[in-house]
Image (cartoon, rainbow, N blue to C red):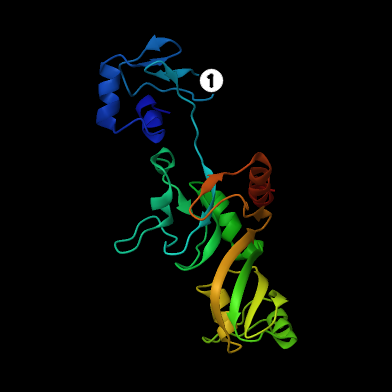
Amino acid sequence: MRLDKLLGNMGYGSRKEIKSLLKKKHISVNETIIKDGSVHVDPDSDIIKVQGDIVHYQKYIYLMMNKPPGFISATADKVDKTVIDIVSKDYQHFNPFPVGRLDKDTEGLLLLTNDGDLAHQLTSPKKDVPKSYYAKIDGFVTEADISSFKSGIVLEDGYKAKPAKLTILHAGNESEIEIAITEGKYHQVKRMFEAVDKKVTYLKRLTMGNLKLDENLRLSEYRELTDQELNYCFSLTKEKKS
């Protein structure tokens, strides 16, 4: 990899700014001052320093966010704030994007990464990665609803959703439920309840496969995935390649 490209990917500035650092002799490779940004380096074996600090190269990032309401799951938008706007510049230079999406008013678990292959594995319909949600429902959720969801709800456009597991936590005029689905259709949970004449008033994603929302994360907070969480994510990619 070219030295200037590596440094650019790691957020050390624009090509012009990196060129200036090189000219000022602020960059070294294996203790040798380098002035030419086109020099090829191996981030796994070469020791690269900028102003005396070692550059720890990282190609991908994996962040778990507790998404707050009011932000859309996109990388940019002309009207609304996006989940990327929440992320610090230390991570933004990796150009992360949300894996799947949560509606603007939906809270909870959202994975941000720049690993396109992994994102595909987590959202591919063929993988059937389950996603669970907690929701408040305007309406009395019944055992009949559980049966209907298990059989596959037919949405307003005629599409029959895959079987979903519905659990009633509290039944009443405002019911509380948990639901697990393996799809990610537009406004799917809301549309499923609309199909049985009920309305979702609050929605929060709890899990995505084996990834569980960290209860210590407040709304808008995020952290890098743990090794155990990463191992689960990578296992999906390995399954694809095997």
- Residue at (65, 75) in percent of width and height: 176
Q: Quadrant of residue 33?
A: top left
Q: Position of residue 137 (x, y in %)?
A: 59, 79
Asked whether, in this view, residue 186 is left or right of residue 38, the answer is: right
Give the number of callouts.
1
Front residue of 4 and 100? 100
Q: SS class of the residue under badge 1?
A: loop
Residue sitting at 53 percent across and 87 percent down?
A: 156
| Image position of 83 (left or right of 164) | left
- Please indicate, yes or no, whether residue 184 appears anywhere in the rendered image: no
Is disc 1 surrounded by few (<14), some (14 to 19) or many (20+) residues within 10 Å? few
Is residue 164 rendered to the left or right of residue 121? right
Q: Is residue 204 above or below residue 4?
A: below
Question: In the image, is residue 86 above or below residue 35?
Answer: below
Name which residue type carries label 1. Answer: Ser
- Residue at 67 percent of width and 81 percent of height: 152
Residue furthest toward the front? 173
Tell me the residue that label 1 is attached to.
45
